[in-house]
Amino acid sequence: MTFDLAADLEERRRQHRFRYPLVMDGPCGRHARLEGRDYLNFCSNDYLGLANDPEVIAAFQQAASEWGVGSGASHLVCGHQRPHQELEEALAAHTGRERALLFSTGYMANLGVISALLGKADAVFEDRLNHASLLDGGLLSGARFRRFAHNDPLALERLLQRGEARRKLVVVDGVFSMDGDEAPLAALAEVCEANEAWLMVDDAHGLGVLDELGRGSLFAQGVNARTQILMGTLGKGLGAGGAFVAGSHELIETLIQFARTFIYTTAMPAAVAAATLVSLEKSRQENWRRQKLAELVKRFRAGASEQGYTLMASQTPIQPILIGSDADAMALSAALREKGFLITAIRPPTVPEGEARLRVTLSAAHELADVDALLTALEQCQK
Ligand SMILES: *Cc1c(COP(=O)(O)O)cnc(C)c1O
């Protein structure tokens, strides 16, 4: 039989890698409601607690009344409504760049940018731990594809100095999504400059979270002017959905002409853009959210490492507990679930073999007492 799907599914099950979505019966926030029970939610990417914020919801409702639900078309036909334009301008100003361009998702932004800029004559250099969408974008582009050791600018430099290419693009996560550590951007920028490469940073997990105005990794590390391409998502720290790319006029014009995932898709609903405008403003002004996150991170790290859990080199709200085997990670996730905590186990191929983990994420929606409760539960699970 050609399509023996059952065998593949069975193999997946046998490896403890079978995945399925949980059906959530409430909004994303401090709690997650499912199967009639409330859990403390420690696995969303809603770092600032804006996904269910009353002001953001009100902006969404108001804009839905005014603009309807669907945009009705792609941006280049007639789907680009005033709120989309305003959000692009606000994102450009926020990130200190000439222009910004909206995409419907971060996945599409990454596919679109890399494949618009690179072709067979070019080369793309990616950190080994880059997000799947960056890797897929590199492969889709047809450019020569090179991966370098995680957060290792010297390894990158060796690769850059080897081969010839028309264009060289270096691509990294600003904050690595499954580890929570940050790319050494100044060192990477230096290597790029010395080798006539462009630097692209995917700041899905830095935007809203890092820098005193939430402008992300590039501002936190002082490399905004040295980074040609910034990609950010709107569905994590900003609590909405969609993504953007920010850079020079020429970059954005190029994407409008050549990024197929921008051209051939329906514009996000205007109400999402309008709601994001409000959450962006809140993320700039409400620095208490970042201060609270820092407190939660400190408390969690101190408590979990004291108990002997293996944490990762992360100062961000992504605080994975490294477990190792898939089965052990699943077992700890299930034990915590029993105690009222929702934390999904992350397994290969999302992370390398033998590095299954519980990806604990903190949010400004949490209280210190929530972290203490989690620490108590972790301690009990160890016994
Ligand atoms: C989540 C994520 C994306 C994809 O963004 P979506 O808007 O969810 O499609 C891209 N890059 C990184 C690093 C991410 O974590």
Image: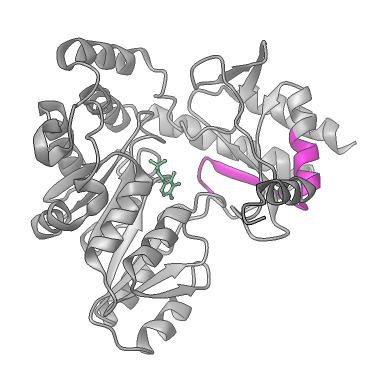
Query: Which residue is painted at 78% across and 53% down in the image?
Result: 325
Q: Where are the magenta residues, as a range?
A: 315-333
Left of 214 or right of it: where is 264?
Answer: left
Q: Is residue 88 left or right of residue 17?
A: left
From this view, report whether residue 334 is shown above or below residue 112.
above
* Quadrant of the image occupied by residue 313: bottom right
Way the structure is coloured = one colour
> Compared to 342, does 1 lie above or below?
below
Image quadrant assignment for residue 304: top right
Residue 72 picture location, percent across and down: 18, 27
Q: Is residue 114 above or below residue 262?
A: below
Q: Position of residue 69 (x, y in %)?
A: 24, 18
Q: Is residue 378 shown left or right of residue 135?
A: right
- Residue 217 in the image: state x and y as whole percent: 36, 51
Residue sitting at x 69%, y 43%: 18
Residue pictured at 69% horizontal, 25% vertical: 341
Ligand number 1: quarter of image: top left
Quadrant containing the N terminus in the rendered view: bottom right
